[in-house]
Image: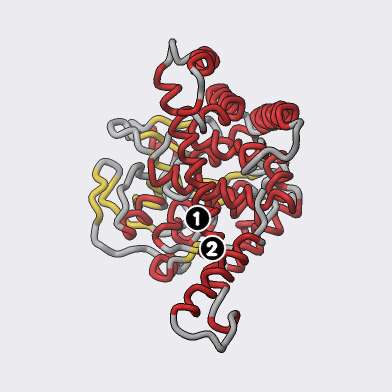
Amino acid sequence: MQVYLVGGAVRDKLLGRPIKDKDFVVVGATVIEMLKAGFQQVGADFPVFLHPISHEEYALARTERKQGLGYQGFSVHASPDVTLREDLQRRDLTVNAMAIEVKNLMDDTPINDEIVDYYGGLDDIHSKTLRHVSSAFSEDPLRVLRTARFYSRYYDLGFSIADETLLLMRELVRSGELAHLSSERIWQESSRAMMQVSPQVYWQQLFEIGALTEYFAPLQQVWNHAKYGQIREIVQTALYFAGQMQLNLSQRWALLMASLNTDLFMLEPTNSNSDNIESNNIATAVKGINEIGNSAKVPKAQTQFPTLFVQQAKKLSRIDQLSAAEKIDLIQACSAHKVPDKLSQLLVTSHVLKLAIQHRQMMLALGSFHAISMDNIDQSLKGPAIGEALRQRRIEHLQTQPVL
């Protein structure tokens, strides 16, 4: 019997990241041997066991074969003759397919510092690449979301997804396999990705490969709309700020769902019927939030907060301009008299969205600044006239840039 620390613990050890959970693979053991050692089996047909003291997961080495649709359509074969190489080959990414041998079932001290690496995980750690282990990647649609989540987790370290892995992800999306994922798993992966340092990367990646259509259709529609392309950029910036500021899940989800109320991104009312337009946009956004909530099994708390946010966002963004009556009405609407923290969270969320809008405005200005050079002004100008001409042309250029 041989015992190995595998997967995320090995990956994060190499990356110098905190190790949250340890998973182990046991080679050459049987179910009976594990039970006799005091381990508790998890599920009748799945060879995973909980350690009697640490309660960490120990799995018998196993292989899988695709037999049906979705991530559950697999038959599992676990026996003492399954090798570590065979077990690691079924994993999703090379950086998750490395192992370190430990002493035994009751002592997880590494035997030595050797990394068991059959599939190039060490090289991909060094090159900062997320790459699939084998063509079996295409058998499990959940790996599309998992890879995007790992991308968001390690984006700040400079990681990228290998081109050939992106190709397989796109093929999985086109195959329709994502429709066979359970809503619970969709939310599990998405909520975990949302709490990474760079949550915007997850949503941008899924958008680019068309993976939002199945469970997040209203979001895909707004982000795909030519007129509202800038909203996607603003929301992704807001999510980046949310990650840096360590906002909670409800706040981050509210920023994402704010995409569905296009009125929040308008610099000024479009016409005299702006109140009606605002009301219609709020209703459309709430409908979209509920649709996504039902489709992806979003918990009630995460649906209620963004609903309240899109309904009150305009007032929250101009809190210093509200009358006394409007402030009292806002407190009532937000139930802030019962839950003061909710109002604080809403105000912070509003502030982050406003920062993202302002950031985009200044990025447009920066683009206009760089777009105009000496080649764009009268070449006969001398001295201070050159600087003034550049300034005026940059102002004119910025005034032609599209705004929502």
Q: CA distance from mark 2 to mark 1?
A: 7 Å
Give the x, y percent position of residue 282.
68, 28
- Disc with the residue nearer the chain's start (2 vs 1): 1
- Residue at 71%, 44% in the rendered image: 222
Please rate how many residues cluster around mark 1, counting C-alpha atoms within 10 Å: few if below 14, some from 14 to 19, many from 20. many
Q: In the figure, residue 184 lies in which quadrant? A: top right
- Left or right relative to 14: residue 124: right
Residue 143 visible in this rendered orientation of the protein: no
User: Could you tell me the amino acid type at mark 2?
Assistant: Ile
For the residues bearing labels 2 and 1, Cβ distance under 8 angstroms: yes
Between 339 and 166, the one lying in front of the other is 339
Residue wearing tag 2:
161
Please rate how many residues cluster around mark 2, counting C-alpha atoms within 10 Å: few if below 14, some from 14 to 19, many from 20. some
- Residue at 45%, 41% in the rendered image: 195
Residue wearing tag 1:
151
Q: In the figure, residue 105 lies in which quadrant? A: top left
Q: Is residue 350 above or below residue 300?
A: below
Between 383 and 29, the one lying in front of the other is 383
Q: Is residue 229 above or below residue 391?
A: above
- Residue at 75%, 48% in the rendered image: 176
Residue 49 visible in this rendered orientation of the protein: yes
Q: Is residue 161 above or below residue 358?
A: below
User: Could you tell me the amino acid type at mark 1?
Assistant: Tyr
Give the structural element (helix, strand or loop) at label 2: strand
Give the structural element (helix, strand or loop) at label 1: helix
Give the x, y percent position of residue 310.
60, 30
Give the x, y percent position of residue 228.
69, 49
